[in-house]
Amino acid sequence: SNFDQLRDLEANFMSEVCKDVQREPQLLPLSGEKFELRSTNTAAEARLDISARGIWNTVDKTFFDVRVFHPGAESNKICKTIDAAFEKHEEEKKRTCNRRILE
């Protein structure tokens, strides 16, 4: 799919400068954790699109969740600017994954 091609292209670029680049890394299993937001992805097989070491420092693993969207789509009409559309999608992704990764 076009999405897979975009994800793979980004991962290939990261491989040039980062270590331990992985496509669709599975998140660690949960062991009873409760999250404030109900939108947090608690699925046993939860994955993100890319992970890599060497983004912010040489040790920490950074996770990326790629989203492709059309700024003119009906669901984006509420956004007054392209920046607002990017922020909307970024916040949606954060609500789904951030707490699970950071905690």
Image (tube, rainbow, N blue to C red):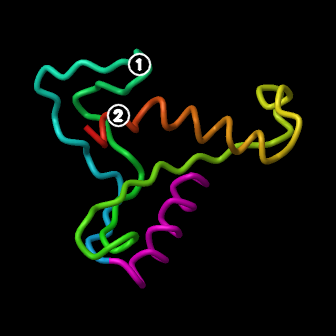
Q: Is residue 65 left or right of residue 30?
A: right
Residue at mark 2 to residue at mark 1: CA–CA distance: 9 Å
Q: Main secondary structure of the magenta part?
A: helix
Q: Magenta stretch: residue 17 in it?
A: yes
Rendered image quadrant of residue 21: bottom left
Give the residue at x 28% y 61%.
Answer: 61
Percent x, y for residue 78? 83, 26
Tell me the SS state at disc 2: helix
Looking at the picture, which amino acid does disc 1 mark? Answer: Leu
Tell me the SS state at disc 1: loop
Residue farthest toward the left in the current orientation of the protein: 31
Rendered image quadrant of residue 72: top right
- How would you rate the neighbour count of disc 1 (Cα within 10 Å): few for under 14, some for 14-19, many for 20 or more? few
Q: Magenta stretch: residue 53 in it?
A: no
Give the number of the disc on residue 27. Answer: none
Looking at the picture, which amino acid does disc 2 mark? Answer: Arg
Give the residue at x 75% y 40%.
Answer: 85
Rendered image quadrant of residue 53: bottom left
The residue beneath circle 1 is: 37
Q: Is residue 18 left or right of residue 8?
A: left
Give the number of the disc on residue 99. Answer: 2
Magenta-drawn segment: 1-18
Q: Which quadrant: the C terminus? A: top left
Which badge, 2 or 1, is on the more N-terminal residue?
Answer: 1
Percent x, y for residue 28? 18, 41
Position of residue 96 relative to residue 10, above or below, is above
Give the residue at x 33% y 74%.
Answer: 54
Percent x, y for residue 23? 35, 59
Q: Are marks 2 and 1 in contact (CB under 8 Å)?
A: yes
- How would you rate the neighbour count of disc 2 (Cα within 10 Å): few for under 14, some for 14-19, many for 20 or more? some
Percent x, y for residue 83? 78, 47
